[in-house]
């Protein structure tokens, strides 16, 4: 698990910990997620671009849920690409080397550009990262959620996003009816990722409707 400190990753971790079929979860990050659970172990690594020294601790896992992400607001393309694409490449190279059969779930975003050549910087860079993950020999899925309603106490690390999410908590059922293809929850993202590695999905790129459909799978 990468990105457990974020809103999406935090929600995914909670679903993994509550799922009785999942034996253990390793959360890799630059700082602690603050969660404690018998199934959870944390690996604090200040430089995620350099995982070679801890590669042995990443061995033996069936799936990777990669939920690392930053807002592109105020960032140069170079800095945004370094985190969004460069870090993805650095992590996946080490992880897939020690776990050749691992299944990958990569969180991207609604509107990402698969051509990686459009005029919107963040969408283009996200598309590059998606293409890299889907080009790996491992079974991989890209998740493109739209609006995500945080549940179970999960919060965004970005103050602006927290302010935007707070008024919508009671409106989510209405938003779901009005915009079924554009909204989901942190719970459904987590359940969908678990079901993707457990039972597969006919699409490799999952848009919001796919996420909600897969989350509801028995």
Image (tube, rainbow, N blue to C red):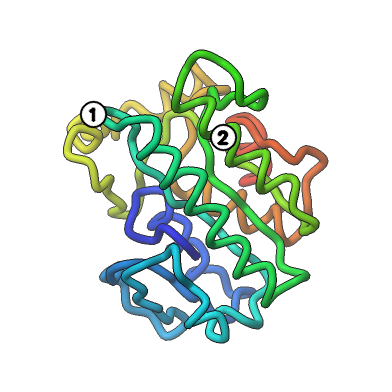
Q: Residue 198's spot in the image, x, y percent? A: 73, 61
**Residue drawn at the location 59% of the way across and 24% of the way down:** 113
Q: Secondary structure at mark 2?
A: loop
Question: Which percent across, then down, holds residue 175?
Answer: 42, 22
Mark 1 secondary-structure assignment: helix
- Residue visible at 67% across and 23% down? 115
Measured as percent of width and height from the top left, residue 25 is found at: 51, 75
Q: Position of residue 155 (x, y in %)?
A: 27, 48
Q: Is residue 201 left or right of residue 58?
A: right
Please report the residue visible at 56 percent of the width from the left and 59 percent of the height from the top. 65
Residue 188 is at least partly visible in this image: no
Q: Which residue is mark 2?
A: 144
Local crowd size for mark 1, using a 10 Å CA cut-off: few (<14), some (14–19), many (≥20): few
Would you say 74 lies left or right of 208 here? left
Real-space Cα distance between discs 1 and 2? 20 Å
Residue at image mark 1: 164
Residue 60: quadrant of the picture: bottom right
Which label was assigned to residue 195?
Answer: none
Q: Left or right of 101: which side holds 25?
A: left
Question: Pointers 1 and 2 in contact (CB under 8 A)?
Answer: no
Q: Residues within 10 Å of mark 2 (few under 14, many from 20)?
A: many
Q: Is residue 115 visible?
A: yes
- Residue 3 vertical placement versus 186 (above, below): below
* Lower position in the chain sequence, tag 1 or tag 2: 2
Q: Is residue 148 above or below residue 118?
A: below
Say which residue appears at 45% left-offset and 39% top-offset: 81
In this rendering, the answer to whether 25 lies above or below 68 is below
């Amino acid at each position: 698990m990468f990105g457990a400190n974020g809103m999406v990753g935090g929600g995914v971790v909670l679903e993994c910990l509550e799922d009785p079929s999942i034996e253990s979860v390793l959360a890799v990050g630059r700082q602690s997620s603050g969660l404690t659970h018998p199934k959870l172990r944390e690996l604090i690594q200040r430089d995620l671009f350099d995982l070679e020294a801890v590669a042995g601790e990443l061995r033996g896992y069936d799936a990777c849920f990669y939920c690392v992400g930053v807002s592109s607001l105020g960032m140069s393309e170079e800095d945004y690409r370094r985190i969004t694409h460069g870090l993805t490449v650095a992590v996946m190279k080490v992880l897939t080397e020690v776990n050749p059969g691992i299944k990958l779930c990569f969180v991207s975003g609604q509107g990402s550009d698969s051509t990686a050549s459009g005029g919107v910087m963040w969408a283009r860079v996200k598309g590059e990262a998606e293409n890299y993950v889907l080009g790996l020999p491992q079974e991989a899925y890209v998740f493109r959620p739209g609006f995500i309603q945080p549940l179970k106490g999960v919060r965004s690390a970005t103050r602006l996003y927290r302010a935007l999410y707070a008024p919508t908590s009671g409106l989510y059922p209405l938003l779901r009816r009005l915009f079924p293809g554009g909204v989901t929850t942190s719970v459904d993202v987590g359940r969908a990722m678990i079901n993707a590695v457990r039972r597969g999905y006919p699409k490799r790129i999952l848009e919001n409707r796919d996420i909600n459909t897969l989350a509801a799978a028995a």
